[in-house]
Image (cartoon, rainbow, N blue to C red):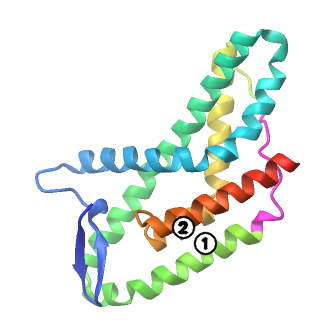
Amino acid sequence: MGRIPMPGGWSMSAVWLPMCGQSWFGAAAGFVGMWAAMMVPMMLPLAVPPLRRYRAALAGTGRRRASLLTAAAALAWAAAWAASGLPLFAAGAAVAQTLLAMPALARIMPVMAAAAGVAGAVWHVAAWRRRAAHPLPAVTGPSACAKALLLGARLGGHCVRRCAGLTVALLAAGFMERGTMVCAVVVVALESVRLRER
C-alpha cells in the first residue's frame, strides 16, 4: 500500500482511504479482506486448543460428523476476526481524515501512536498471566450445525476481545510492517504454548 507524507516528518498508510476512483465501500471491503488474511492465520494457534476440546466433546457423534462440525465452528471463529476489521476500518478512516484536516494534530500523532502502542502491549502482557483458556460457551440452536456456528462465533468474539490490547499495539506500530508482524506472531505463539500446557 502507498503512504501519504504527513506534517511532522512521518507518513500515514493509504490503507485507511479509498484509492483513486475507489468507493468507500470498496476500500472497506479491501481492508476487511486484508485484515482477515493477516489476522486469521496469526491468531489461529490461540483457537486450536478450544477447537480440539470441542472436537473431543463430539467424539461420540462419529468421526466425519465431528470433523465437519469442528470445521463449521472454525469458519465462524474466522468470520468473527474478519468482521472485527470493519469497525477498525471505520475508526482508522475517521482518524486519517481528521489528521489530513488538522496538521497540528498530525504533527503529534507519532507520539500519540507510540503511547497507544506501549499501552496496548502492556495491557496485553499484564493480562496474559490472568487469562484462562478459551471457554467453550454453552450454546443452544435448532441444529448441530447452528450450534457449531454459534459456538465458533462466540469463541471468535472472545478471542477478538481478549486480543484487544495486542490489536491496539499492532495498529499503533503499523500492522503492515514486517517487524511488527514478527513480534505479534512471537507473542501469539508463546501464548498458544502456554494454553496447550494447561
For label 1, the crowd category at 10 Å Cα-Cα, with few meaning under 14, some 14 to 19 and many 20 or more, is: many
Q: Residue at x 31, y 70 (%)?
A: 96
Q: Label 2 belongs to which residue? A: 168
Q: Is residue 194 left or right of residue 170?
A: right
SS class of the residue under badge 2? helix
Q: Is residue 5 magenta?
A: no
> Which residue has dot 1 on it?
120
Which corner quadrant of the image does residue 73 belong to?
A: top right
Q: Position of residue 48 (x, y in %)?
A: 70, 39
Residue 139's quadrant in the figure? top right
Residues at circles 1 and 2 in contact by the CB criterion of under 8 Å? yes
Give residue 69's position: percent from left, percent from top: 67, 19
Q: Decide which of tag 1 and tag 2 comes sooner along the chain.
A: 1
Q: Give the vertical position of 83 relative to 19 (above or below).
A: above
Farthest left residue in view: 21
Density class for disc 2 (Cα within 10 Å; few <14, some 14-19, many ≥20) is many
**Stretch of the chain drawn in magenta:** 127-137
- The amino acid marked with disc number 1 is Gly
Amino acid of disc 2:
Val
Q: Position of residue 61 (x, y in %)?
A: 79, 10
